[in-house]
Image (cartoon, rainbow, N blue to C red):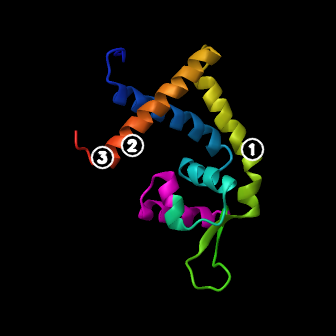
Amino acid sequence: MKSHEDERLAHLVRLLERQFRRSLQGRLKIHDVMFGHWEFLRILWDEEGLSQKELAHRAGLTGPTAHTALNKMEAKGLIVREVPEGGNSRPVINLSALGRSLRGTLEPLAVSTNDIAVKGMSEEEIAQMRRLLLQMNRNLAADVVEGFAK
């Protein structure tokens, strides 16, 4: 098997993301939750009553992708679409009782996945990695905002 020691950072981050996804996806599947629904659940556990557009933006997804996932979540009974009082605006997305109840079951699975990923690392190393990843994210976000001018 080829070593990844000399790979570019972007490729290593992508490989890591895939491994995180696979690990968490396997845990979520046991509870009949699709990985694609995970991000929406996380967002809605913190704030309900968002529009589909707001949810798509926060999840970093396109509108059509969010629409498809939310339709499936609604069919599974995880969310409900509700028209705000007055009926003059688009529906907002709220969790169903089932969607709310899954938080206590699913969040520990994500914590477990993270714990596995950092096994053998010190708290200082984890904190440093978090700072570095956040800095990389800020750098790339600024590049996008600047319009790839560099």
Check whether the beta carbons of the residues at disc 2 and disc 1 lie within 8 A of each other: no
- Tell me if 84 is positioned left or right of 138 in this view: right
Crowdedness of circle 1 by 10 Å Cα count: few (<14), some, many (20+)?
Answer: few
Q: Classify 90 as above or below 77.
A: below
Crowdedness of circle 3 by 10 Å Cα count: few (<14), some, many (20+)?
Answer: few
For marks 3 and 1, give the one nearer the viewer: 3
Task: Read off the magenta span.
Answer: 56-77
Dot 2 or dot 1: first in sequence order is 1
Kindly report the distance in space between the C-alpha atoms of the residues bearing marks 3 and 1. Answer: 41 Å
Kindly report the distance in space between the C-alpha atoms of the residues bearing marks 2 and 1. Answer: 33 Å
Front-lying residue, 66 or 139: 139
Q: Classify 50 as above or below 89.
A: above
Dot 3 or dot 1: first in sequence order is 1
Which dot marks residue 146? 3
Residue 138, given in percent of the width and then of the height, sits at: 43, 38
- Tell me if 9 is positioned left or right of 131 in this view: left
Residue 84, given in percent of the width and then of the height, sits at: 65, 78
Residue behind mark 2: 141
**Residue furthest left in the image:** 150
For marks 2 and 3, give the one nearer the viewer: 3
Crowdedness of circle 2 by 10 Å Cα count: few (<14), some, many (20+)?
Answer: few
The residue that appears at 70% across and 44% down in the rendered structure is 106
Q: Amino acid at mark 2?
A: Ala
Tell me the element at label 1: helix
The residue that appears at 42% across and 30% down in the rendered structure is 13
